[in-house]
Image (cartoon, grey):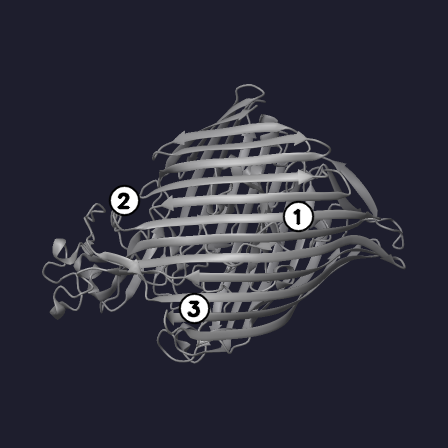
Amino acid sequence: MNKDKNDLAPGCLAAAVGLALCSTSVHAQSPAPDDDARMETLIVEGPAHEAEPRSGKFTAPLLDTPKSVTVVPASLIDARGATSLVDALRSVPGITFNAGEGGAPAGDNLKIRGFDAGADVFVDGVRDAGSQTRDVFALEQVEVVKGPGSAYTGRGAAGGSVNLVTKKPRDEAFLVARVGAGTDAYARAALDGNWTFGDAAAFRLNVMGHEGDVPGRDEVFFSHRGAAPSLAFGLGKPTRIALDYYYYRTDDMPDYSIPYGRNAENTAAFGPPLDVDRENFYGLLNRDFQKTGADIRTLEIEHDFGSGLTLRNTMRYGVTSNDYIVTNPDDGRGNVANGFVVRNAKSRNSETTTKANVMTLLGDARTGRLVHRFAVGVEVADEEMYNRGYSVESRFNANVNADFANSCSAPGAVGPLSGYNCTTLADPNPHDPWSGTIAPSDSATFAEADTTSVYAFDTVELGARWLLNVGLRFDDYSIHQLSGPIDSPALAENESDFWNHQLGIVYKPTVNGSIYLSSGTSSSPSGNTLGDGTENLSDANADLGPERTRTLELGTKWELLGRRMLLTTAVFRTEKDNARVAIAPGRGAPQQNLGKQVVDGVELGVIGNVGDRLQLVASYTYLDAEIVDDGPIESNDGNRFPNTPEHSASVWATYAVTPRLTLGAGASYVDLRYGNAANTVWIPSYTTYDAMASLDVNDRIEVQINVKNLTDEVYFVRPYSNHYAALGEARSAVVTLNVDF
């Protein structure tokens, strides 16, 4: 089993840093001596393909694609002991995750290059709508496309997008089991089996169960279950049909962690999170919960017409849900400064339904002396989201002492008289017998979005050393939303249509190198997140046009050491000239497209093999993300983007000590991040270290040990705009037994 693990890169140039290229037969363009000669195709023998993006919209190998793309293969995910999407993306600097609350939900709410991307997650090329928490048990790889990319994905994608590639049936039989146990009651079991039958047919099944406590957090636990059966017919034939079903459920204790400090006037949150015991949990075990779910059905049909022409159609029906009540350790009303915390309840109970069909025609063509590799397609989607949270009432809400205006300093506010809605900052008790009431809210939100899109991509060979990459997409988008009291909701609507492009020129000085200059755009209409994220529709923005983001990127990629090492470098500038900004103080104020935001950045990366034993994945991202103009309210002008580190870096290396023993270690650094646009609350920078060791007992059995956060660093990973910041995990250790039957 050691050989498969070490195949992360001998010749496999995955791009956990910017790009990836790894294949049993990697096609690259070779410059001929004669400028008029055709570029010849080279076949480079290497390990099994695992890091080339699967999207048909990429019409050239990644070495020749003028775009920053990161591919995290399953081998890297397994080596680092990752189990969630958040874990898997730790190898990709420039990505952070937002903290949630009630309106902006708790879940995989990510940012890429400083811009919100919670609604820009895709599964096998189809938008995975709805706030969720995601596992990696059924994933083949994770792909990150950076920079404005609406030409690829449609609405949103101002900073980029993430595509999750699922495990598909193969024409070989295998059965692999993974069983893990560790500190903090960690227990995880997963099975991946593939069975062939009949004429070119196969069935694949992935199942997973996972539960435990969150390291370093008192009384915070999780329990996850998943299954992903898939059936394929016509493997290796001109016509191929695949049917997939994805089932996933979570039952967790949500955790908002630690409140911020207060300013000198005790009127607002200010500074970093408070220095209290990292195990302090301010939630209530008899009130708080989070349950998420996903039921996704996919039918994919492919047909090869010959002469390099393939038609691919993907049809999906999916339902996802996010249901929770969580304690916000409220820093309001002056309580924190007096040593108290309000157990303010935030809630959500949303369900999102997606019906989508994506059809793409891929092929090669020649016009005169020019060779084209193209993809054209059409996409239609209908997405619906319904959210009706909870009304959480307690004696505290009813003013146990009106003279103290709901302050935890009121007599009896801490304890049974307030139903335990207040607790002490220093010594909270999550077992307090909270005695309030919970009922469905009197208000709800229903949103429906319809999208029709057409797109075309083409890579054109311009002589022996030049490639032109062109992409164009048109989207017709409309959203209708009812929100407010259930018996008298208010209607808000937005209809938008927009064009976006991807344009790049590639110069190949040698077969193993490329230099590119590219530009791309994105469009984010009002209601982009469908009431289930950070960019929702409201009266304040319903009549506004889409925000427009554009980028210019200069980069180079080189395969070295016999194509066993990939070096990448990119510098870029991203601008949004019509950002939506409030034109008056206060929540819900009217907005206009008057703001300007700019991100200047640099990305560096290296991945591959140094010699026969050492594998290295390292990357660095610099982001100078500035709010240039925040509209009529000028106090934020010149500030940094929220939750956007200036510097971030990641390194992971493994060394094969013997053919059976492999050792690995890595580090991650994330710079200081502000929680709000005013830059008045922040979380400090941090560095964490991980390690692993794996031993092949024999050809079928492997034992792997992973230790995360070796130094037991106390650090924060998600800053909210006020109230609180979420802690990262304490030190933990897991032993995993991998058995290949």
Instruction: Nearest to the eye among marks 2 and 3: give it.
Output: 2
Distance CA(mark 2)–CA(mark 3): 33 Å
Distance CA(mark 3)–CA(mark 1): 46 Å
Q: Secondary structure at mark 1?
A: strand
Question: Residue lying farthest front?
Answer: 487
Identified by mark 1, the residue type is Glu
Distance CA(mark 1)–CA(mark 2): 47 Å
- Give the residue at mark 1: 300
Instruction: Judge from the rendering whether residue 603 lies leftward or rightward of residue 312; answer left or right.
Output: left
- Picture residue at 63% right of the left edge, 62% below the top: 380
Instruction: Nearest to the eye among marks 3 and 1: give it.
Output: 1
- Give the residue at mark 2: 279
Q: Label 1: how many residues lie within 10 Å, few (<14), some (14-19) or many (20+)?
A: some
671 w.r.t. 20: above or below: below
Identified by mark 2, the residue type is Glu
| Disc with the residue nearer the chain's start (1 vs 2) | 2
- Give the residue at mark 3: 639
| Residue 25 visible in the picture | yes
Q: Quadrant of the C terminus?
A: top right
Q: Nearer the viewer, residue 333 or 138?
A: 138
Q: Indicate the position of residue 13 as horizontal and vertical percent values.
A: 65, 41
Instruction: Judge from the rendering whether residue 467 lies leftward or rightward of residue 348; answer left or right.
Output: right
Q: Indicate the position of residue 434 as horizontal and vertical percent values.
A: 20, 52
Q: Quadrant of the N terminus?
A: top right
Q: Indicate the position of residue 719 as horizontal and vertical percent values.
A: 38, 57
Q: Label 3: how many residues lie within 10 Å, few (<14), some (14-19) or many (20+)?
A: some
Q: Secondary structure at mark 2?
A: loop
| Disc with the residue nearer the chain's start (3 vs 1) | 1
| Disc with the residue nearer the chain's start (2 vs 3) | 2
706 w.r.t. 390: above or below: above
Marks 2,3: beta carbons within 8 A:
no
Marks 3,1: beta carbons within 8 A:
no
